[in-house]
Amino acid sequence: MKWLLKKRVLLLLFLGFTAILFLSTNWMSWFYPIYFKEEIRKHSSTYQVDPYLVAAIIRVETNFKTGRESKKGALGLMQLMPDTAKWALEQAKLPDVSMSRLKNEPSANIELGAWYLHSLSGQFDGNRTAVIAAYNAGPGTVQRWLADGSWNGSQEDIKNIPFGETRHYVQRVIYYYNQYTEIYGGVF
């Protein structure tokens, strides 16, 4: 009889938890959180880039963990390569951003990353898939793929991206982008 009572209690707890999950309007955000929303919102707005794209790139690059430096030397939340960061800093002329701040300061890293995404968007006529690929492989490489017909730049043709790492990267960023836009909708 005691085991039957335990099963009932467990069943009630399970049903209660399930009801909370499904009755909560934004329960999926528990599994796909976005951190640094204010910084992402601010810098995405300033540089006219999609905040969900910025969040998806951060998720894939560092899973929102600050202070990261890759084996190749990429810095901070958005994993900006030092040469790219130096070039972007020269071009953007951002007074509040410096190389020394990129690794550990989320706002500085997100600002430069958003500026760079805006720059890439201009180079690739707003083609989000090509922008994501260029963020990973570099704009020159992606321009070469588009010019020689290796890849046509479309999301439907991702399987033809010549670099496996970039192909996988683009797929992951698009996956998280889709999750974020579906979960958070127009409310960022």
Image (cartoon, rainbow, N blue to C red):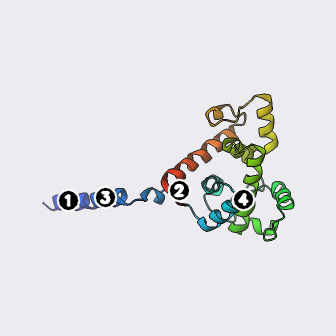
Q: Pointers 2 and 3 in contact (CB under 8 A)?
A: no
Q: CA distance from mark 2 to mark 4?
A: 18 Å
Check disc 1 and give the amino acid type.
Arg
Quarter of the figure with residue 21: bottom left
Residue type at the position of mark 2: Gly
User: Residue placed at 59% from the left, 65% from the top?
Assistant: 37
In the image, residue 49 above or below residue 130: below
Q: Are marks 2 and 4 in contact (CB under 8 Å)?
A: no
Give the secondary structure at mark 3: helix
| Residue found at x 77% / y 39% | 142
Q: Tag 4's secondary structure?
A: loop
Tell me the number on the disc at residue 86.
none
* Residue identifier under label 4: 47
Please tell me which residue is depicted at 78% across the width and 56% down the height of the picture: 73
Tell me the residue that label 1 is attached to.
8
Q: Earlier in the sequence, mark 3 or mark 1?
A: 1
Quote the CA–CA distance across marks 2 and 1: 41 Å
Q: Which residue is mark 3?
A: 19
Dot 3 crowding, Cα within 10 Å, few <14, some 14–19, many 20+: few
As rendered, which of 50 and 71 lies closer to the eye? 50
Q: Quadrant of residue 9?
A: bottom left
Three-letter residue code for mark 3:
Ala
Q: Nearer the viewer, mark 3 or mark 1?
A: 3
- The residue beneath circle 2 is 186
Of the image marks 2 and 4, the number of the one nearer the N terminus: 4
For residue 154, above or below residue 77:
above
Q: Is residue 7 left or right of residue 168?
A: left
Q: Gap in Å between the C-alphas at discs 4 and 1?
A: 55 Å
Q: Identity of the amino acid at label 4? A: Tyr
